Image (spheres, rainbow, N blue to C red):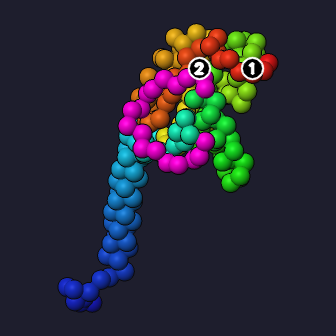
Amino acid sequence: MKKTNPGSITQKNFIKLKKNEILLLSGMTLFVLITIALMMSSNLMAGPVAKPTPEVSATETTTEAVTVEKINKTITPEEAKTLLEADQKRATETKTPPEVYLIDVRTPEEFSEGRIPNSLNIPLDKLESIQMLVPYADRSIIVYCRSGNRSAQAAALLGTYGYNTVYDLGGIVNWPYETTK
């Protein structure tokens, strides 16, 4: 009978050791994957990561950064028009996406009857889908509806989704500027 050193590894023991290492490694990998999945799902449930946003003051014609303290605020049609025009100019000059989004929370039927130019239609009952269209919480969002009721609800909802600069324009009935169909 062949004697083996107690500290040496035989081929049979080596195979058992490798199987245990694989099982141990698989268990650790599974633990890491579950931990990452839990961390990601808790972040997704919290909504987009909100960061302070530089924004264009609605009363200025320049694009100087302004610190925003209040999350949901009302905005007049004049202020909204100035903010949207300044952002459109900035986006055109820098060839970058908009930083201010105009969202119409009315139904598609109402939207087709007349809307503010360059607005996106996301009905109030589908507002959670905004995270696919506006994935960055630091973007400014202006919401409007027909009379102001749904836009106020939308502004409150967007705050719960993590968006930190939401303006309530109220109703399109108060918009004195051009509309399109």
Q: Nearer the viewer, residue 134 or 145?
A: 145
The amino acid at mark 2 is Tyr
Question: x, y (%) of residue 178?
Answer: 75, 21
Check disc 2: other Cα within 10 Å, few if <14, some if 14-19, many if 20+: many
Magenta segment: does it hold 9? no
Q: Nearer the viewer, residue 61 or 150?
A: 61
Question: x, y (%) of residue 66?
Answer: 46, 44
Using the image, tell me which numbered label, if any, was put on residue 179: 1
Magenta segment: does it hold 70? yes
Magenta part, dominant SS: loop
Rendered image quadrant of residue 11: bottom left
Give the quadrant of the C terminus: top right
Position of 115 relative to 70 (above/below): above
* Mark sitting earlier along the chain (2/1): 2
Give the quadrant of the N terminus: bottom left
Position of 44 relative to 143 (above/below): below
Quick one: which residue is furthest to the right in this view?
Answer: 181
Q: Which residues are magenta?
A: 61-78
Judge from the rendering whether residue 101 lies leftward or rightward of residue 16; answer left or right.
right
Quick one: which residue is furthest to the front in this view?
Answer: 60
Position of 15 relative to 160 (above/below): below
Q: Nearer the viewer, residue 11 or 149?
A: 149
Residue drawn at x 45%, y 26% is 73
Using the image, tell me which numbered label, if any, was put on residue 144: 2
Question: x, y (%) of residue 19?
Answer: 37, 67
Question: x, y (%) of residue 48?
Answer: 46, 40
The amino acid at mark 1 is Thr
Check disc 1: other Cα within 10 Å, few if <14, some if 14-19, many if 20+: few
Residue drawn at x 69%, y 44% is 89
Q: Secondary structure at mark 2?
A: strand
Judge from the rendering whether residue 18 lies leftward or rightward of residue 85; answer left or right.
left
